[in-house]
Image: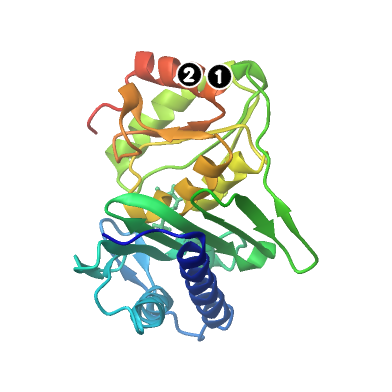
Amino acid sequence: MTTLTDDLLGQLLERARAAARAASELLLSPPTDLAVEAKSTPTDAVTIMDRRSEQLLVSFLLDGREMDGVLGEEGADRPGTSGFRWVIDPIDGTVNYLYGLPGWSVCVGLEYEGDPIVGVVAAPTYGVTYYAAKGMGAFRETEDSTEPVVPSTVTDMSMALTATGFGYAAPRRAFQAEILRELLPEIRDIRRAGSAAVDICWVADGKVDAFYEKGLNPWDFTAASVVTAEVGVVLAGLDGREPNPDLTIAANPELFAKFHDRLKALGADSPV
Ligand code: IPD
């Protein structure tokens, strides 16, 4: 067993922040040819920069910590023996990246014995990095300042600006559109910015009031989950489940309960 002192957590957070910074710098200078390949469907893209960013993150994070595990969107997967596992998304929002749109992010999360303890979500095209360590608060860092993040106090669904995202397969997208058709008249509005990790950090930071999505993977939410946990935002699935691919919702506790019940009634977690 390792004791998670503030000192150790601080060091691990610094490692995660430095890795996300290095990956962000790499990604801000893309080559002309992104060597795009399709993954699950023709619109689910991976670029050479997703792979390079993942390679950089893995070697940076494991340098001197060779016993740690790692799980990455582009294939990194080893259990490790230290109890620590890095969960990374080298580009969350690859479609934004491909189109030269802002808002993609680099996610570096760290779990100890399965519990998320450090999270960094860097969105360099917004000039923002969100970061948190368990018990040490959650922060928004820009070039000019570092501020604690504060979620919104909206508790009425009809006033909730709500972020979401859609999968890559046509049947799932059709299903998600049906859920949204029901929900849209009941909420303030929708934002679909293109990076689930940023969406979740935006809930923590009061930039949106709520988030839900079907189809998320651990690399999409692990880093952001530390940011939400530190400010009392609930990030979870239905019926007390952890965030999961069937459905993940984020909001302050009172608003979460309302989204939870409505999305459950709509069957938004159905297997599609
Ligand atoms: C995607 C983004 C997007 C979300 C998708 C994710 P990727 O991640 O987070 O916002 O709607 O569900 O898969 O594929 O760009 O890493």
Question: Closest to the observer: 8 or 244?
Answer: 8
Residue under label 1, please give it. Answer: 254
Identify the colour scheme used: rainbow
Give amino acid for label 2.
Ala
Q: How many neighbours does mark 1 have within 10 angstroms: few (below 14), some (14-19), or many (20 or more)?
A: some
Classify residue 170 by image quadrant: top left
10 Å neighbourhood of mark 2: few (<14), some, or many (≥20)? some
Give the quadrant of residue 146. Answer: bottom right
For marks 2 and 1, give the CA distance.
5 Å
Q: Position of residue 15 (x, y in %)?
A: 48, 74
- Above or below — where is 204 with respect to 187? below
Q: Quadrant of the N terminus?
A: bottom left
The image shows residue 11, relative to residue 102, as above or below, that is below
**Image x and y of residue 162, in percent:** 58, 32
| Residue 71 occupies quadrant | bottom left
Residue 175, position in %: x, y?
Answer: 34, 30
Secondary structure at numbered mark 1: helix
- In this view, 264 is above or below 49: above
Above or below, 227 against 57 in this view is above
- State which quarter of the image contains the C terminus: top left
Assign a secondary structure to mark 2.
helix
Residue 222 disc label: none
Judging depth in this view, the residue of 245 and 80 nearest the camera is 80
Residue under numbered circle 2: 257
Position in image of residue 179 (x %, y %)? 41, 24
One can see residue 98 in this view: no
Question: Could you tell me which residue is drawn at 54 percent across and 76 percent down?
Answer: 18
Check if mark 2's residue and mark 1's residue have beta carbons within 8 Å: yes
Q: Say what amino acid the circle numbered 1 marks.
A: Glu
Query: Which residue is pictured at 42% across the width and 42% down the height?
Result: 166
